[in-house]
Each structure stands twice: as C-alpha cells, then as structure tokens.
Amino acid sequence: PHHYQVSANAEAQGNIALKADDLPQLVSAPPAEFGGPGDQWSPEHLLVASVADCFILTFRAVARASKLVFVVTEPIGRSVQTRYGVPPERIVHLTNGTNTRLFNLDGRSQLGDRFARQLHPTRRYVGYAGALWWSGVDVLIEAIARLRREGHDYGLVVAGEGEDYDRLRRLAKAQGADDWCLCLGMVPYGQRPGLYRRCLALTAVFPRQYMRDFGSSSLKVYQYLACGRPVIAARGSGH
C-alpha cells in the first residue's frame, strides 16, 4: 500500500498550514459558508478537488491503456488527441441515438406530480433539459423576459443541475422571473418525455465557444424530436 502523510498546524484563530514532505505549504481556511474568508482553499474545496483530480488522472491512464477511445463528437476526439496524447487511429467517433421506446409520440410517459404542479396550466413554456454548464440558459432567461415585457405569456422550464445552477437562479431573480422561470433540478429520465410534451418548444442553445471546443452529441435534440417537439438549437458540429 501507498502511505501519504500530511500535517496541519494552526493557532486559535486564522488559517491552517498544511505540510507534506518535499511539497510546498498549502494554506487553508473554512469556506465562507462557515465563517471563513472565502479566499482560501477550504477542506470542502480540497475534498472536491481531489475527486476531480482523480477523475482526470484516471481518464489519462485509461486513455493510454485503451486500444480504442470512443467519443461522441469530433471536437472531443481532437481534444482527446491533443490533451491526452491518444493517437488518432485509436479514436472512434460514435454518435448518440435515443431510446424511442421511451421518447416517442404516444404519451405514455407522464411527468410526475411533484414537477407537474409547478407548471402554470395555460402558460406556453420553452424548455431546456441537461447539464447546467455552458448551457446557454442565461440567453433563454433574457429572451423570455423580453417576450414577457412585450406582453407574451411565455415561461421557461429548466430540468438539470450543474455548476451554473445557482448563477442562473440569481439571473432569473434579477429578471423578476420567480413566477415564470422554473428550475426543476434533476427530472428522472423516465419522466422527461412528459416534460417535453408540456413545452411549446425545446432548446439546445449552447454558446459558440462550447460548440467550437466540444460540439454537440445531439442527444437532447434527438430526444426532443422523438417526442415531436419543435427545437431551437445552436448552429455547429452535431446540429
């Protein structure tokens, strides 16, 4: 087994000094949520950082050891090649599809009551489902706010979680969107067709830089279309 030793030293007040053999000292403090200054590494940040670090290191090791690496977009394939040194002949571009036994026009999949009762019965909703990371939802919030100022009773429903969740909630509040912008969090996979059918249109409006760096796997677009809904999508690789 491998052994790692770290020492922590601190006074009654102030930062904590973290030390390990032959490594630079790392200063930490409580996060702002627990009375800390908010400008130092906290135990919570260090814990999450170690998980993210291990994820990348594991991906590198798996990529180097794999005979083939499957990617869902060509830009991701290029990134894997340049960032992780995987030869192009070992990278296979395999596009996504969708489960048409679930995502279809027959309407058997229903949105659960916990989510359905949050939707206004007559409001016309534009929807987005997916990770809230470079999602373009900020553009949707501003667009729907403009339509409402012009007298149109549109709403926005967002199904997903991610690092942008809190920022988007703050943006919605600043636009006075508490009533018409619904951030539902993670909607179970089996209930998403029911949500899609409650929307006038569905979106995949990723920012230009995201489309350039990652492209789109088109998964959500396929799901939207399989449910017979109009789609508003960014122009780019995969769309």
Image (cartoon, rainbow, N blue to C red):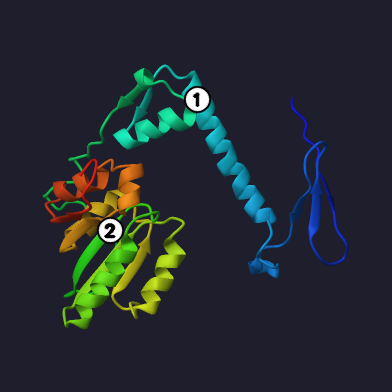
Q: Earlier in the sequence, mark 2 or mark 1?
A: 1
Helix, strand or loop status at disc 2: strand
Residue 185 visible (yes or no): yes
Nearer to the camera, 227 or 40: 40
- Name, please, the residue furthest toward the right: 11
Nearer to the camera, 8 or 107: 8
Res. 128 mark? 2
Image spot of residue 93 (x, y percent): 29, 28
In screen coordinates, is 183 left or right of 63?
left
Which residue carries the number 1 mark?
A: 62
Instruction: Tell me which corner region of the image, top left, top right, bottom left or bottom right, holds residue 137.
Output: bottom left
Res. 236 mark? none
Instruction: Tell me which corner region of the image, top left, top right, bottom left or bottom right, holds residue 113.
Output: bottom left
Compared to residue 237, the image places residue 174 above or below, namely below
Image spot of residue 108 (x, y percent): 17, 51
Compared to residue 94, the image places residue 44 above or below, namely below
Figure quadrant of the N terminus: top right
Image spot of residue 145 (x, y percent): 26, 76
Residue 110 visible (yes or no): no
Compared to residue 203, the image places residue 70 above or below, namely above
> Tag 2: residue type?
Tyr
Label 1 packing within 10 angstroms: few (<14), some (14-19), many (20+): few
Figure quadrant of the C terminus: top left
Residue at position x 18%, y 74% in the image: 123
> Tag 1: residue type?
Val
